[in-house]
Image (cartoon, rainbow, N blue to C red):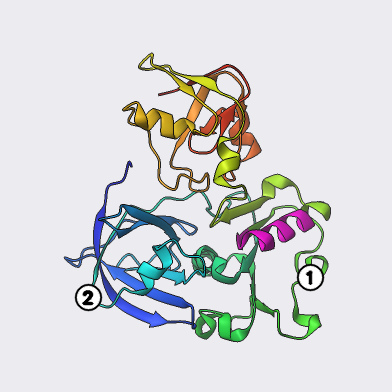
Amino acid sequence: MSNEWLDTIVVGRRDATARIVVLDLVSPDGTELPEFAAGAHVDVLVDSTAGLVRQYSLCGPPQDRTRYRLAVLAEVASRGGSLGMHRLREGDRLRISRPRNRFGISDRARRHLLVAGGIGVTPLLAMAHTLESRGAEYELHYCARSREDSAFLDELEHNPRVRFHFDDGPDDQRLSIAADIGPPESETAIYVCGPGGFMDFVISSARDAGWPTEVIHKERFAPAESAAAHTADGSFTVRLAKSGGEYEVKEGESVLDVLLAGGVDAPYSCQQGICGECIVRVLAGEPDHRDDILTDRERADGMFTTCSSRARSPILELDL
């Protein structure tokens, strides 16, 4: 893994809901943490012995570099990440990566529509902080099962730009694509984050309403396809342009797995096709994109995720 780990200390811990914990992290020596832009996330080394790494969005104001704030939902089917984070207490040390961001605020938009589902509010909260500081035009639509399941109510419910949509509330306050998103508008961008089904509904509904794909920005916490789908289909050869090495990628293997097994120093992090750390450029061949992070423009420009995508051609040459 291509991470430079930073040591931090948990200086604040509170239960925002029965299942969401909010953690404040600072540098051990009191120095400022690396700067980040709204929408960024960090890798967290939850368990160094097991090598357990998870990605969490930074939800505090980006202009405050004295601390990072994370909000973590205790997943029912947790593989150890969220439960490990919930066990943290003030004074505990935690190793994190430098912030990375593939979900930033569009510099082409004048108006911004933020649509959050549950814990998906975390990166959008940082965006709201930034847009507020800029005096920019935005709306945050926060969808949750109930008020009791909603974090950050204390800092959001008095903001006139925030609309809450609760599953257990009256029908007239539930999210409506027609009323809350509306028809496409020039210089307006949509940002969506939350559970997969929620995101699929918002994105497909916005597209059906005529919103262009390029103005809909998204970040998933889990891949839309299973790991098996990422490695299905026949074998092909990966050729590395810089080293000249060639590696056969068989069905059931990912390009990244094969490269790492061959001793190649290939970048990676989440291994699910959602963080973007493993992206490399394709120099020749036809890729079969199976990630959920690259835009159509990036794919056309030759970008490729080694952890989840494959090849349609017999040989795929990569800029490695």
Q: Give the secondary structure at mark 1.
A: loop
Q: Is residue 185 visible?
A: no
Percent position of residue 28, x then y: 19, 66
**Residue sticking out furthest to the top:** 244
Percent position of residue 140, x then y: 63, 70
Q: Which residue is at a point 22% across and 75% down the rendered structure image?
A: 91
Which residue is at the front of the view, 53 or 320? 53
Q: What is the chief secondary structure element of the magenta stretch?
A: helix
Q: Which of the marked residues, 1 or 2, is nearer the chain's N terminus?
A: 2
Tell me the kind of residue under disc 2.
Answer: Gly
Which residue is at the front of the view, 133 or 251? 251
Which residue is at the front of the view, 310 or 284? 310
Percent position of residue 200, x then y: 70, 56
The stretch of residues the image draws in magenta is: 192-206
> Eyeballing the image, is 69 above or below 2?
below
Density class for disc 1 (Cα within 10 Å; few <14, some 14-19, many ≥20) is: some
